[in-house]
Amino acid sequence: MVLVKSLAAKPWIWSFVGALVVWLATIAFTGGHGAGGMVTAALSLAVFTVIVGVGQMFVITLGPGNVDLSLPANIGLASAVAMKVMAGSDAMIVVGLLAALACGAAIGAVNYLLIWALRIPPIIATLSASFIIQSIDISYGRGLQIKPPPGFADFTNWQILGIPVLAILTVLFTIGAAIALQRMIYGRSVLAIGQNIRAAWLAGVNVGRIRFLTYTLSGALGGIDGALLAGYFRGANVDIGNEYLLASIAVVVIGGTSVAGGKANVPGVWGAALFLVLLLTMLNTFGVSAGVRLLLTGLIIVGVITAAGGEKAVR
Amino acid sequence: MTAASIDNGFKGAAARNAAARARLLRGLLPALSLALVLLAIAWLNPRAISYFGFSLMLNLAIPIALATIAQMFVISGNELDLSIGTFVGFVGCVTATWLKDAPLIGVAILLGSIGVYALLGALIHLRNLPSIVVTLGMSFVWQGLAILVLPKPGGKAPDWLLAIMSFKPPFIPFPIIAALLIGLIVHFGLMRTSYGVILRGSGGNPAALRRAGWSLLKTKVVLFALAGLFGVLSGMALIGITTSADANIGNGYTLLAIAGVILGGGEFVGGRVSPIGAVIGALTLALAASPLLTFMHIPPDWQVAANGAILIIVLAARVLISRRER
């Protein structure tokens, strides 16, 4: 009973409850068929949302107005870079991943450079950057038909006892992110800046450096995500990252991270990502048309956010 | 709160005069960017600077300007609407189907959608929700509805709408007159009426307004309803030009509208916006996005980048001017 109570008090528990409810609703509809397969599929797809979601979470935690809108363009470009560098050869997998990581980190660094040099809100900076990245990607990745190396494609689809290996690795990564957030100077600084940037600055936090690191981190995670997506879906694509704009922000908010900044929640990102993926699976299983699916996805996201509620912003 | 606001705290009160001059220069920046783009076009292709050339080049500027004004209302309340593009697309689909075949139902749907916008404003205020997330969610809703209304590209604009949009006044091309009218009407409403001041104040200093007894719920509802109204006008104008609709027709407008507001001298927070600036910003984007690039022989791949580059250049110019304010 005590356990239930302490669990109910955790902000992230509701996203897992939501995911569970959606999952149960779907298997009730199918009469229990494909229950395990659904979990496997949900885990493999949720991974991509979780990776960018964690990056977005650190950015949003920096405080009001901080958000990375360049993630979709970033993912698209990095997927093309990774595929071109790997050039279908197993020997180049690590180099390709590093190239995608570097590409993403560079985009993140440029984002912060714009924010810092032009003193503009991050939304506008990352938006302007995403326009340019998008064009680079269209021009660079035009007609790109390179398949990922077989070893890389197999790796991104590799499962052990129905659990995707990528999901296991991502769980390890999120545990690392949670430790970085709660137990390391970097994470504590991010939280401090989100709670009160001026107080953090007066307390000796190197605000500029931490913000730079956070945007670079978000960019780098977008880059890795692009490479993994290209491996999983067997090819790069300009539009491959499009859905991750909404998804990355939505998982952060549904997962219990405060949009006002200064309060982050790593487990919630997992719960929310599973919830979103299972929701799509459910709507597909029900066999609704594309229009109804979009409509319901939107309504449910707005509904969940309304139910989760915002906190009183301390501004 | 950004690092910049910390810097501002140390700003002295000195050099008021220079600051006033810089502010004037800053106010002129949108017009200067537009003039620059026009000069470039005139230099690259003198024949474009004519009645016919402007009618053609600025054709799509009307819906862009209307969508930009819609976004401007939301931004003056310190919020952001990431759904305006798909909303314009939804309105376009309704315009090309219901509004032509059953005008009464069409009008009811469009009025209802403005009502939905007003409700969103109330929801965002009452539950203190982040507008970015709510409107991102709504962008799916509008897109879904658009596909349900018009599953395949098609439909047809009502004849009266086609007649309005192809109106050819003497001497001055219609898009320019329309842009002027839009800018002036909104300027009067938002900058010159007392409730307009309250609306902008709700973004500038909400706490002060609340203490002065104004309802922040009402200001937010009004701002969102106005955004919905101008979104509807934008969608209708767009269909009046393209004559038929497609569920994805407005998707690019979300980002164009934000860029237009910022180009037009709007600030992201603090209720500092400029309707005339926003219209000029929209015209600049409409001109720079395609006619200028076509004349410069830049491939269409880079048109999106040009928008980003223009934004960055204008913002950089603004920073240079603001430096002189100190």
Image (spheres, coloured by chain):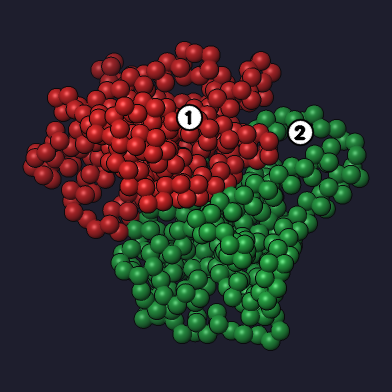
Residues B54 and A135: in front is: A135
Residue A150 at x, y percent in the picture = 24, 34
User: Which circle, 2 or 1, is nearer the viewer?
Assistant: 1
Residues B189 and B278: in front is: B278
Mark 2 Cα-neighbour bin, 10 Å: few <14, some 14–19, many ≥20: few
Pointer 2 and pointer 1 on the same chain: no
Q: CA distance from mark 2 to mark 1?
A: 34 Å
Kindly identify the residue that appears in the image at 70 percent across and 73 percent down.
B46
Give the residue number, with chain letter if any, for mark 1.
A102
The hue in which chain B appears in the rendered picture of the protein: green
Residue A251 at x, y percent in the picture = 39, 36
- Chain letter for red, please: A
Does residue B203 sit above or below A43 in this rendering? below
The amino acid at mark 1 is Ala
Residue B21 at x, y percent in the picture = 87, 49
**Badge 2 vs badge 1, beta-carbon distance below 8 Å:** no
Point out the image quarter for the N terminus of chain A.
top left
Q: Which image quadrant is residue A210 in?
A: top right
Q: Secondary structure at mark 2?
A: helix
Residues A95 and B119: in front is: A95
Q: Residue furthest bottom?
A: B170
Badge 2 sits on which subunit?
A: B
Residue B180 at x, y percent in the picture = 69, 71
Q: Which image quadrant is residue A225 in?
A: top left
Kindly identify the residue that appears in the image at 29 percent across and 41 percent down.
A147
Give the residue number, with chain letter if any, for mark 2.
B8
Badge 1 sits on which subunit?
A: A
Kindly identify the residue that appears in the image at 50 percent across and 50 percent down.
A135
Point out the image quarter for the C terminus of chain A.
top right
The amino acid at mark 2 is Asn
Residue A131's tag is: none
